[in-house]
Image: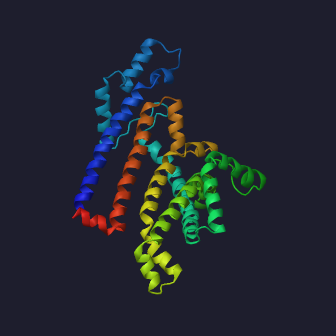
Amino acid sequence: MLTLIARRLGSLMLTLAAVSALIFVVMDVLPGDPAAIMLGTSASPDTLAALRHELGLDQPLLVRYFLWLGGLATGDLGTSYTYGVPVAGLIAERLAVTLPLAVMAILISVAIAIPLGVASAAKRNSSFDYLAGVLSQLFIAVPGFWVALLLILGFSISLGWMPAGGFPGWEAGLIAGLNALLLPAVALALPQAGVLTRVTRSAVLEVLHEDFVRTARAKGLPRRAALWRHAVPNALVPVITILGLQFTFLIAGAILIENVFNLPGLGRLAYQALTQRDVIVMQDVVLFFAGLVIVMNFLVDLSYLVLDPRLRGRGR
């Protein structure tokens, strides 16, 4: 097992190094000069050259790349060209909105999908199974931003129950913060719930046909107990995989929802940095997203070792 973990860690570090190089090269070849964007089109060539020198943009690509890596290793993510503040502080501030939003969305998704998928598998080919299939397909097909607009029209404008957008800050209180994130979390959760429902149903159906489930039923174990004690725990491996992927998607893919609800999250920061050609912010945010995906995949691999003893045996 330790050998498997060491291999996964080595693969994680190599992947991060490759991704960081790719991100830096791609950001460098993007059109537009950050110095010209900051000073405007009327700036003189001497002023542009001085600012480029101050920002280190006149140094060779390889030198700038290793300076960036050195800063990442020491926790210095650089200073934003646009905001003039450390990027680490910007990411931490925006993550305080995006991370709770993603956690709320994944909890809502699990609360909908797991019971719906398990019940659909237990009642295969019934009217309930058909209805669950239609709902999950509907959740997948409808775009999240359109769901967000419907939620705003229904619960904010028509009923006035929830805020239509904005974030008051956690200093305004936990209830106020969660209330502002509830509708965005639902808009993010529904498409993911549709995918998770279908995966859960398929996984549980596959396990229900295994010999150990039939043996448990033959020994007199009630159907419900066999389902929840034996079938569902053994069907968790593909479900955990999808959950890991969904969590990273909810962190990195919330740009549209954060813009619809005017939330000061990490996705909105990435969008603003792209429009303002703030290269250092884009590099750090994209690397953060990529690193999060890689780390989540590593944690999913570790969960396999916990859930499936056969993999621990192979490691030995």
Residue 241 located left or right of residue 15? right
Above or below 81: residue 160: below
Q: Quadrant of the N terminus?
A: bottom left
* Location of residue 203 in the rendering, given as x and y in whole percent from the top left corner: 47, 64
Is residue 181 in sight in this rendering? no
State the residue lying farthest toward the right: 158
Q: Nearer the viewer, residue 128 or 238?
A: 128
* Location of residue 27 in the rendering, given as x and y in whole percent from the top left corner: 41, 30
Q: Exactly how many numbered labels are in the figure?
A: 0
Q: Nearer the viewer, residue 66 or 39?
A: 66
State the residue lying farthest toward the bottom: 220
Q: Nearer the viewer, residue 172 or 19?
A: 19
Residue 201 located left or right of residue 149? left
* Location of residue 91 in the rendering, given as x and y in whole percent from the top left corner: 46, 44
Residue 45, image quadrant? top left
Task: Identify the residue shown where x is 28% and y is 44%.
Answer: 14
Residue 106 located left or right of residue 13? right
Task: Identify the residue shown where x is 36% and y is 34%.
Answer: 22
State the residue lying farthest toward the top: 45
Task: Identify the residue shown where x is 56% and y is 44%.
Answer: 264
Colouring of the image = rainbow
Is residue 305 in sight in this rendering? yes
* Location of residue 38 in the rendering, given as x and y in whole percent from the top left corner: 49, 24
Residue 226 located left or right of residue 60? right
Q: Nearer the viewer, residue 312 or 280?
A: 312
Task: Identify the residue shown where x is 35% and y is 58%.
Answer: 301
Q: Quadrant of the C terminus?
A: bottom left
Above or below 73: residue 202: below
Above or below 5: residue 218: below
